Amino acid sequence: MSSTTTAQTLRSVSPATQKFLENTQGLRIGAGTDREAEQGATFASIDPTTETILGSIASGSSKDVDAAVAAASAALGSASWGGASAATRAKYLFDLADAVEDHVDQLSELETLDMGKPISQSREDVLAVATVFRYYGGWPTKLEGSVNPVRQPYLGLTQLEPLGVCGAITPWNFPIVMASHKIGPALAAGNTIVLKPAEVSSYSTLYLADLARAVGLPAGVLNIVTGPGRSVGQALVEHPDVAKISFTGSTPVGRGILEAGSRHMKKVNVELGGKTANIVFPDADIDAVVRGSAEAMWENAGQVCVAPTRMFVHDDIYDEVVRLMGQQTAALQIGDPLNPATDIGPVVSSRQYGSVKEYIDIALNEGARLTTGGRLPERTGYFVEPTIFADVNNNMRIAREEVFGPVLSILPFNSEEEVVQMANESAYDLSAAIWTRDISRALTLSRRIHAGTVWVNTSGRLDPAQSFGGYSKSGNSRELGRESVMSYTRSKAVMLDLSV
Ligand code: NAP
Ligand code: MG
């Protein structure tokens, strides 16, 4: 029933990573590469594997946000950025992609130490970031305006402009990936950015800002203000000179940001929580179902907005799938996330650990059947065994709420109608997955499922060329793809009277 626990490996990281952690990390504002917060305040970053302090980071204030927005505004009007050609902006993004790849060791070590993600997954994240920057490096030179079929004697043009200073607020679960989803399209369209990463995992974003500086991105184009959401984040949302807020995080915080940002007449994009329905029909390739679902579910210890946490399995194959998911899960290696063989590291923080533990108790009290895991390994670090509950019903809290940890619910279903209804009965509409060999069924159901993304015979896959985002309580926008870069532009109509 339980998963195996690997021995602690030697926690050695590259000298560059060590050096980065030894220095108190400052804010990245304007030309300042490493600047103290206004009041000299710092906060400690905790390693969730050892529960020890990794290092300290500047804790910004609203004054620091003011300074960062001023630097970003100045860069907009500068010859080096505001006046740069589209090809120059493209080159910065391509060079940043190369730099990210060159520093994959340091960036992935920082991510893993800071938030407990297994190193193999951190490496994949960092390499994905390079592809995001490369994808958006292709856009500056393709952002075309139009000549419109207006009546005579006029000539009507539409031109695309950057919005201006964009504020970005990112969550802790995919720190560098989420940063790239905002930085890539914002810079492609010629904006400047002030970014606030989540306190619990700020390091990789700071390192990324240093790489941007090293490839010559002009001062003030990318500014990072670390510190609490309630002060730094809020100041950004309320700042009069910030044109847009792009937020990824939880639904309650997102709702507050949407309200506050709208009051200040900003464009506010929110990417929020999820409770992905993962629907398995009897004609599916069961090996692929188990492999694909387990991989997507246990990635980052289940702390993934698109984790397929509600697995609906048809009655005909229910017992078999429950058994195989248990088998696959019990074979996972829990342990030091710096060990390349580790599949499951700790959850991000003691707070998250407490919350996941509570959900396991809630599920047991509600009568869900524990089939796999459920225990908290007796070792230092915020480790939770990957846990499967079967015979869950759609009204139980673990089926309705975002657990954001390694806890999977499996629910039986009998008919297509029933499963569509259950899948759609959710507070979230981020994503869904359908496993079937019947292509008509897959396409029909993908229309009927309320979600911004539907995967067929796979789960959790993103690609920079494909927009991603939720409906309703899961968000109001799309990241990646064309839609995202367009959301960092505004159009201007220019009309000329040709008879004059
Ligand atoms: P969170 O608590 O909502 O925090 C997200 C960010 O907002 C953090 O940087 C946080 O800063 C900041 N923040 C908190 N309160 C704020 C306020 N009043 N004003 C401005 N900023 C504020 O979310 P999280 O726990 O970091 O991340 C997990 C959540 O993100 C889950 O719900 C997950 O589903 C969602 N998520 C969604 C997507 C998607 O693409 N749809 C992707 C990844 C994650 P501090 O934490 O430093 O205070
Ligand atoms: Mg940390």
Image (cartoon, grey):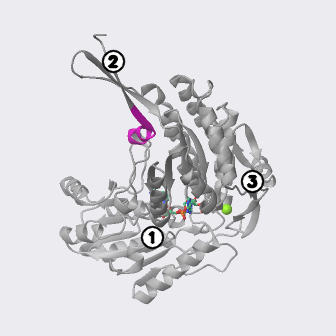
User: Three-letter amino acid code at disc 1?
Assistant: Glu
Q: Which residue is mark 2?
A: 496
Q: Which residue is mark 3?
A: 13
Residue 289: quadrant of the picture:
bottom left
The CA span between labels 3 and 1 is: 33 Å
User: Three-letter amino acid code at disc 3?
Assistant: Val
Q: Observer-nearest residue: 188 or 145?
A: 145
Rendered position, 481 above or below 58:
above
Residue 440: quadrant of the picture:
bottom left
Q: Name the residue at 64% across, 55% down.
A: 111
Majority secondary structure of magenta residues: helix
> Which is nearer the N-term, disc 3 or disc 1?
3
Q: Report helix, strand or loop for mark 2.
A: strand
Q: Name the residue at 53% across, 76% down.
A: 356
For disc 2, the neighbor class at 10 Å (few under 14, some 14 to 19, many from 20) is few
For disc 3, the neighbor class at 10 Å (few under 14, some 14 to 19, many from 20) is some
Can you tell me whether the CB of the residue at mark 1 lies under 8 Å from the nearest atom of ligand 1? yes
Q: Which residue is mark 1?
A: 402
Rendered position, 391 above or below 474:
below
User: Three-letter amino acid code at disc 2?
Assistant: Leu
Q: Observer-nearest residue: 128 or 275?
A: 275
Which quarter of the rendering shows the C terminus?
top left
> Which is nearer the N-term, disc 3 or disc 2?
3
Rendered position, 479 above or below 232:
above
Query: Closer to us: mark 2 or mark 1?
Result: 2
* Drawn side of residue 316 relative to residue 184, left or right: left
Residue 154 drawn at (x, y percent): 27, 17
* Drawn side of residue 474 relative to residue 31, left or right: left
> Which is nearer the N-term, disc 2 or disc 1?
1
The residue range painted magenta reads 482-491
